Amino acid sequence: ARPAGRALATHMVIDETTAMASVQSDDETAADAFWWTGVWLWSLWNLGSLGGALLGAVIGEPETWGLDAAFPAAFVALLAPHVTDAPGRVAALLGAGLAIAVVPVTPAGVPLLIGALAVAPAAALRVRLARVAGERR
């Protein structure tokens, strides 16, 4: 890629673009998924920011619209295609269980972070198992 394209791409490296690109079967489709996801998210984020600035007082609290659940739901949707084997399922269940368990005792947003951090040991195990399987071939 050209330097200008790489510089622009750095502004689009976020969870959503990475997740959409990483589940594609070939490099060309992955690049298309990355760029289209990035362009749409950038556009919608800015339109949403403008809408919030203009209509924020009218809209009121996000909780009344159920918007407080949007980010955790999006996070789960991004991770779901990656949960394809037993270690992945264990990691997902561990993270979800811990996140749900700490909801009553932590501020909003913290359970999602704790759930994501809980996945790290299972992800490390998955990498190790993949290396061992590769050595056996």
Image (cartoon, rainbow, N blue to C red):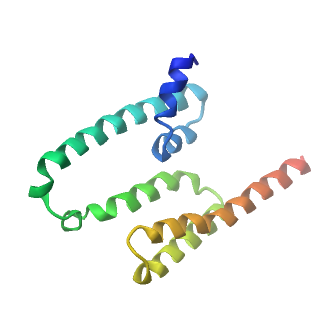
**In the current view of this chain or complex, which residue is farthest to the right?**
136
Q: Residue at x 51, y 18 (%)?
A: 4
**55 above or below 42?**
below
**24 above or below 107?**
above
Quarter occupied by the N terminus: top right
Residue 101 x/y as whole percent: 48, 81
Q: Residue at x 52, y 76 (%)?
A: 97
Q: Nearer the viewer, residue 93 or 85?
A: 93
Residue 80 x/y as whole percent: 51, 56
Q: Is residue 65 left or right of residue 43?
A: left
Q: Nearer the viewer, residue 4 or 44?
A: 4
Q: Is residue 101 left or right of residue 84?
A: left
Q: Is residue 133 left or right of residue 99?
A: right
Residue 25 x/y as whole percent: 59, 35
Q: Residue at x 74, y 62 (%)?
A: 125
Q: Residue at x 55, y 69 (%)?
A: 95
Residue 45 x/y as whole percent: 31, 42
The quarter holding residue 22 reads: top right
